[in-house]
Image: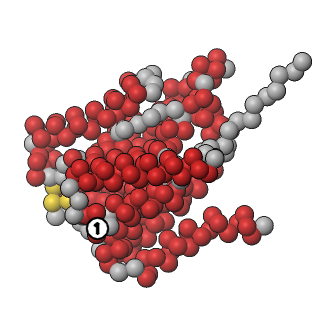
Amino acid sequence: MLYVAVPPVLPVIALAILPLVLPHYWQKVLISTAVFALLALSWDFLVSVGMVSLGQALFFGVAPYLSGSLDRYAGLPVWLTIPLATVLGGGICTVFLLPVLRLRGIYFAMVTLVLPLMLERTVEATGVLGGTEGLARLKPFGNPWIEIYLVTAILPLALFGFRRLMATDYGLVLKAIRDNDRAVMSAGINIYRLKAQALFIASSIGAFCGAYMTHVYMFVGFLRSRLFHFALGICSSWWDGQLRRFNHGCFHFGPALRSFTGSGRVTHGNICALTSGVYRGSTGGDLSLYSAKIPKVRKMG
């Protein structure tokens, strides 16, 4: 049974060893890659429930302001600001999106795309939370090993946790909502409550990423660059495959691409999506994290 047990363990071993052998710059690349992998997992989880979201920038953007405010105004330590910002950020994002849970498809996606832009303009117009200058001089982690191993430990926990969750009865109901929400409603199940729960889980993952990066950079600023950065995560997660998500993250933050202009980076994202789609088609299978299908029942007679 080694051929079954070994492959899932290899990424965990790699994430444990890489910080010890990588130089400082590539440790930062590993941190950024792990963060975007978590955001991709969050997006993929929402898609598995039938909610195509472009609002990961909202999840990622609310938590830094919460974490930065708890640091600056309340004086809380890092080990309190990150958990609090994760839970509060997930709750706030869920409340923001509760009124639009009845929307489906592109209509839900459009609303989730607009909300981060509204948040940015609100901060810019009112000057709250530092306004255009943001909040600086926030507390760092203090220990670089805690900084890197925190996110590399959360990543496999989230990956295998989501896989386990979607294999339970609860996960099967969530996937059934994606496949045929009317049939689930006819069974007497409140799909909007389940959608809200899934939204809280996904937004909490994104909020953790934002709160974590706040103390990595010790700064909270505008979401403009974050909106673009997550576009590549959408490209890679759209075509599924965890390894391709890691590759795209590494390529995106590589030294060669850091000098690209905006149009060059967009071109690179399109190439990544195209090549991933060609690879997916050549394999003849669905490589999605949650690709398990509910078996169909044959008609009798």
Q: Residue at x 32, y 63 (%)?
A: 253
240 and 43: which is toward the camera: 240
Rendering quarter of residue 168: top right
Q: Residue at x 44, y 62 (%)?
A: 247
- Which residue is most to the right? 301
Q: Residues within 10 Å of mark 1 (few under 14, many from 20)?
A: few
Q: Amino acid at mark 1?
A: Ala
Asked if residue 68 is positioned above or below residue 91 in the image, the reply reads below
Quarter of the figure with the C terminus: top right
Asked if residue 81 is positioned above or below residue 222 in the image, the reply reads below
x then y, percent, for residue 230: 34, 49
175 and 282: which is toward the camera: 282
Residue 129 seen: yes
Q: Residue at x 45, y 61 (%)?
A: 246
Rendering quarter of residue 286: top right
x then y, percent, for residue 274: 44, 48
Q: Residue at x 56, y 49 (%)?
A: 280
Q: Is residue 63 left or right of residue 149?
A: left
Residue 87 seen: no
105 and 90: which is toward the camera: 105
Secondary structure under the numbered disc 1 in the rendered image:
helix
x then y, percent, for residue 211: 32, 55
Quarter of the figure with the N terminus: bottom right
Q: Which residue is mark 1?
A: 256
Asked if residue 85 is positioned above or below residue 296 in the image, the reply reads below
x then y, percent, for residue 185: 60, 20
